[in-house]
Structure formats: C-alpha cells, structure tokens
Amino acid sequence: MSLLRFDKLLYREAAKDLENNEAQKKVYDSTGNCVVLAGPGSGKSKILTLKLAKILNEDIEPPQGVACLTYNKECARELKEKLNKLGINESSTIFIDTVHSFCLNHVIRPYKHLVNTNLPKKIKVATSKEIKDTMLQTFNLTIGKNEKHTSSWSTAFNVYRRTFLERESSEWQTNDSDIAQWILNYENSLRHQGLIDYDDMVLNGLWMIKENQWIQELLQAKFPVIAVDEYQDLGASLDKIIRVLCIENDTRLLAVGDPDQSIYGFTGAQPSLLNDLAQQSSVLKVRLKKNYRSKKNIVKASIASLLEERDFVSSRDGDGSIIFHSIRDGIDAQCDYICKEVIPNILTSDPSNTLGDIGVLYIDKNDGDLIAEKVTIEGLQYIRVDGNAPYNKNQLTVWIENCAMWCSGGWLKGSPKFSEIERTFGSFFLNSNISESKLESRKLNLFKFLFRCRDVKLKLSDWLDEFNDSIVSELLDFFTEEPDIVKEYNKLIVSAKNGQLKDFKISSLSRQVGSKSHLNLYTLHSSKGLEFKYVIMFGLEHGRIPWLNVLENKVNESRRLFYVGLTRAKDEIHLLSSGWYYDYYGRYQNYGPSKFVLELKEFVDNNL
Ligand SMILES: Nc1ncnc2c1ncn2[C@@H]1O[C@H](COP(=O)(O)OP(=O)(O)OP(=O)(O)O)[C@@H](O)[C@H]1O
C-alpha cells in the first residue's frame, strides 16, 4: 500500500512541470482520444509517459490495462525506462512493445485457431536469411525474367505490401500487378516453409481485428487505452488498427508524433496519416510549441532547414551555436578532425562536459565503421548504434544489457529494477512446461549470479561467459520460434571475445544511452528521440544527403532526416563536409557539400 502511495507521488510530482505549459496540461487532463502533434524537444515523450501514469493510477484498474505501441525495441525500452521512473512497471496488464509484438502476442497467438487464416499452426518467425532467399526465389519466378534483383526492388516490395493492405481492393490488383503477384508468391512460399515474417504479423493482426468484432471487443476489454509513440513512423497497417479500435470502436487513444520527423518512407510510413487521424471529430488535437531541448539559434536554424514556417520557440536561455567545418580531404579526414579537434575542444571548453554529452551522427553504417576506427585509435570509449554495430537488439540482447546495467550500478539506483529483469526472465519460459518451483529456483540462480557480479569493472567477455554457463545457455531453446534472436546473442558473445567489444567492461554494454564516459555514435535514423548537449554531423556531401537524381519525396525525406539530426542538439551543432566523397563502388563523386548545409549556412550567416 505504501509503495502505491509513493508511486502516485512520483507522477504527480513530475506533473508539476506541466503547470507552465497549457498545451501539455490539456493532454494531461484529457478524457478521450487525444493526438499530440508537436515538434522536436517539445515534451511529447514526457507528456505521453505522464498521461499514461495518470491513466493507470486514476482511470483503469487491473485486470484491465494499457497497450503502448512503439516503432522498435529500443523505443520500447526507452519508454519503459521513463515509465519506471514514474513508478510504472511493465506487467501482464501493461504492454509496452512494438506493433509486431502486440499483433503476435495479443491477436495472432491467442485467437488464430478460432478464425480463418492460412498462418502455420505453430508460429515460426523466418530468419533474415530465409526472408532474403524467399524474396529472391519468388522474384525470379515473377519479375526476374526481365529484370535483375536490386535493393530498390526490395524497397518497392515492402512499400507496396505495407501500403495496399486490402487484398480484395482494386488498388492492390492494379497499382503494380507484378509486385502484387510477387508478394503473393512470397507469402505462399513462406507458408509452405511453415514461416511468417514481421509484416505477416501486422497484416494478419489487422485482418483478424478488422474482420472479427469479437476480437475488437476482447482487445478493448483488455486494453481500454492504447498509446502510440512516434506515430508518424508506424505506417498504414498500424493506422488502420488504430482506426478500427479507437475511431470505429471505443478504445481510448493517446498518440504522439511529429510528421516533420517522418524518416521511414522506405518502409511504407506515411506522415499524412497522423495529420488525418488528428482531424477526426472524436479526437482532441493538441499542438505543443515550446522546445525545451534546444537553444534559440538551434530552433531557428532547424526550422529554416525545413524550408517551411513553424511556430516553435525555444524555452531555454542562451543562444546556442551552429558551426560549419569545411574539411578539404574527405570523410576520412573529417573523422580525424572530429577526434583530434572537435571533441577535445568540446571537452576543454567546459570542465563539466563529458564524452556522454556528445552525439556523433552520420548517414550509414560505413560511416560508423570509419568513425569507430578513429575513436578507438584515440582510446575513447563509445556506444555505437547502426547496422554494423556488433549485434542487434532483440528481447534477449536487450535483457542481457539490462542485466549488465543492474550489475554495474543499476542495483543501487533501482534502474533497472530487479523485478523488471525477473519479470522478463519469467516471460522467456511462458511457452515451456516448467513448474512453478523450478522457475522460482532459476530466478533465484539469476539473482545470485547478478548479486555476485555487482562490479562495474568486470570484463564483458568474462561476465558473458559466466552468465552464459549459469543462466543464458538454457534459455536459448525457448527461442526456436525466432532463430535470429539466438544469432544476435551469438554475435554479442563473439564480439566480446574477439571483436569490437573486446576490451569492454560490463558498464560499456550496460548503458546504451546516457553513459557519461562513452561517446555516442549513431546513424541519423537511430538518433531519433535522443538528445545531446553537442551534436556533430559528418559526411554531409551532396549525393549522400540528399541522394542525386531521386524523386522529390525522397529529397524531402532526406531533408527531414537532416532536421532530425539538427534537433537532437541542446547547445551546439558541428556540421562537417568536404564537397566530395567516394561512393559505395569506390568512385570519386564531387558535387559539393550537401545543399542542406549550404542553405543552412546562408541562413545562419544572414540571420543569427
Ligand atoms: N513542461 C516541461 N518543463 C520542463 N522540461 C520539459 C517539459 N516537457 C519536456 N521537458 C524536457 O524537454 C526535453 C525534451 O522532451 P521530450 O524528449 O519529451 O521531447 P520530444 O517531444 O519527445 O522530443 P523528440 O520528438 O525530439 O524526441 C526533455 O529533457 C524533457 O525532460
């Protein structure tokens, strides 16, 4: 009882911040569907978590709960952390995860045997290799007679599949009948192999919800409230699910997003969906205008980079700076300059600055390789999130990171809480026949292991070896449905032994964002939702951002990506370009600095 009262105080205390922001207060006090449309740093995540805490404390009681849907596992983890701080922990009634996981665990798994679907009896998620092979094989059957398979075909496939959701509609048949046929062949082939992929989860989840009123009612009984973070990135199928549950039915919606930060068009995301949703008569639309993150000049410059008017204003003192660096000798030299000049200058300019205050943002994983190599030479510790990062995040690797975080100081701060680690551990055994007492004894072993390893300085590879032997190895059998999960775990082990993570301590694994002693290396895409006192963006060459000879919508998406990078900064931005680069095939390309950089420089020179 006393714990409950303490938790209530937490969110009420945090909500005091809203007193000086009428728009956030309006969301906090709302009683029905609410869509928050707002710019970067305006407190969308803050209001989403506070409002959820309020709803959970004041409006609904278990066994009813809320489903909070996000774009990927990392977003889900951040949200869980923010909710933890408000005294809300994930539980059987509080679901915080991706849309895929929601469809799989709350629609497909429980109800697929009761409806007409062609999904396999036992769900097995295709590995990325199985997906790639099946796509290529079915491409060759349908389109490949006249065409060579390239990555733009795969993009077209994905966008088509995620845009035209109704297989009976004329749009599906006629827009591009070859791609439509390719998709059908691909799905049939996966079914023959007894497999499904991530899009199958969302599409089948949608179809099952849409065609079965009773599923809608069951979901509503279980989750009378659905929250969606970063709505602009989630695409048409999620939008349709939300419309069925929250607009056509009575599930309450809390959605936040920013169409200006829509950067996943290549996956089928459409920024207009959020605007349309906000126009519905049953929806309270709220716009937030104060930017709490960035200093004045950064807000002005980032708006200028959009080439459109926005009425956001900084609520911070001080001007903030945007600094342009022209580095003649190319991207490699830019990385050297970052390590030898920019970072040391930042660190000496204010003794309280740490590596953790700095975010280095770049276009792709190859840039990540370059900068990671240079910072390693300089002996700097770093956190890296991109496609060439040592391993990808999934429920197992994220859980292991959380365990490492607990051992390296989390146990003192209650972040993460052992109860959360234990709950996720228990969830791995859900489909096993393990007895209560055996599960309890395994949980005790887990606790003993973590308790024994409370030491920031433990070498990651030693810790992982021991963790594997005493706890993780016996978990691996539970992931046969999703073999990629085990693959990523193995990559983590190999990297800690001989790869990028070789000299890492557990503290380096444990904190992916927010560690003071680690420089942050992120692609522009993965920097979404983060904030750094100093942002350094490099490789800003015309032809890389935006690409050359692409349609206007692609240029606009690159512009929004540039905007996402700029708006991660609180105090200072460094932009580096050379005016030339080598492309993926090693060819010299020389089109000058990115036009986004040139436009911005002109604005800064003339206006700030
Ligand atoms: N009412 C408020 N008073 C003081 N600080 C606030 C308030 N609302 C938000 N903040 C702070 O502003 C910063 C940005 O908030 P938040 O991360 O929620 O923004 P966001 O809109 O989700 O940003 P983005 O879309 O760029 O990810 C955070 O440091 C947060 O604590």
Image (cartoon, rainbow, N blue to C red):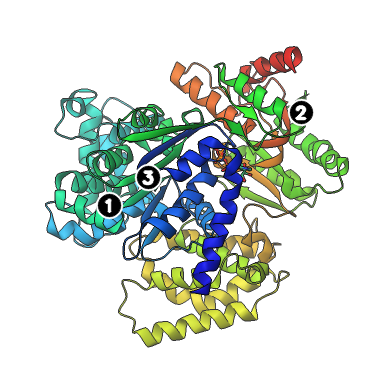
Q: Residue 242 or 4: which is nearer the viewer?
A: 4
Q: Which residue is mark 2?
A: 319
Q: Amino acid at mark 2?
A: Asp
Q: Which mark is residue 277?
A: none
Query: Helix, strand, or loop for circle 1?
Result: loop
The quarter of the rendered structure image containing the C terminus is top right
Q: Residue 216 or 366: which is nearer the viewer?
A: 216
Q: At which x and y percent is residue 437?
A: 38, 87
Instruction: Compute the Cα span from label 2 to label 1.
Output: 52 Å
Quarter location, residue 368: top right
Identify which residue is drawn at 50% across, 28% down: 260
Q: Which residue is mark 1?
A: 196
On the picture, is 352 further left or further right than 596? right
Q: At which x and y percent is residue 250?
A: 25, 45
Quarter location, residue 176: top left
CB at disc 2 and ligand 1 closer than 8 Å: no
Q: Taking 117 as reference, is 477 above or below it?
A: below
Query: Helix, strand, or loop for circle 3?
Result: loop
